[in-house]
Amino acid sequence: MDPEPEESRGVFWLELLIVAAVVFGVAVLATGRGGGMAEAYPDRPEPTLPEDRPLTEADVAELRFTGALRGYRMDQVDAVLDRLGHELAQRDARIAELEAALGGQPDPAPAQPGEQPRQPHRIGPEQPHA
């Protein structure tokens, strides 16, 4: 057997030294020494809903969630949001109808900007004007 040449032993030690230096550098960075990484900020917008008023059908229709690798099935969530928006619209219409039937309550269809507000429809006998 031929003894190992001196040059190949030197290359081995050089490679070993480089690997040790890389492992040491990674360990230093992983433990937070030598400065740390910059703070991570979320890069996706959070779904927002209004806090100052009740939800409307439009709020639900505009709501979007971000997907993830192990997230949700978008078609299922969209179906639920569609149903929720429809049911909110039905509920709001029914509430407005009942409030209008009681009289003196807010009009079921509020006036648009620049439009004169409508008088609520009163149910029952007319009151004589004095």
Image (cartoon, rainbow, N blue to C red):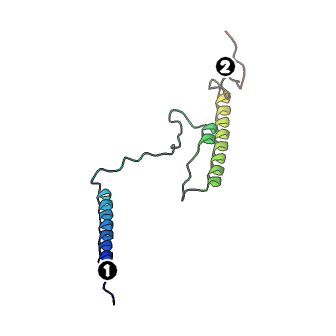
- Give the answer, above or below, for where 109 lies relative to 72: above
In the displayed structure, does residue 39 sit left or right of residue 10? Answer: right
- Give the answer, above or below, for where 124 lies relative to 1: above
Q: Position of residue 85 (x, y in %)?
A: 64, 43
Circle 2: element type = loop
Locate residue 71: give its quadrant: bottom right
Q: Quadrant of the N terminus?
A: bottom left
Locate residue 96: give its quadrant: top right
- Residue at 63% x, 23% y is 104
Kind of residue at disc 1: Pro
Q: Position of residue 62 (x, y in %)?
A: 61, 40
- Residue at 68% x, 27% y is 109
Q: Position of residue 127 (x, y in %)?
A: 69, 17
* Residue at the spot of label 2: 117
The extreme bottom residue here reads: 1
* Residue at the spot of label 1: 5
- Residue at 71% x, 25% y is 124
Circle 1: element type = loop
The extreme left residue here reads: 33
- Front-most of 45 and 98? 45
- Front-most of 82 and 121? 82
- Front-most of 79 and 90? 79
Q: Quadrant of the C terminus?
A: top right
In the displayed structure, does residue 42 sit left or right of residue 114? Answer: left
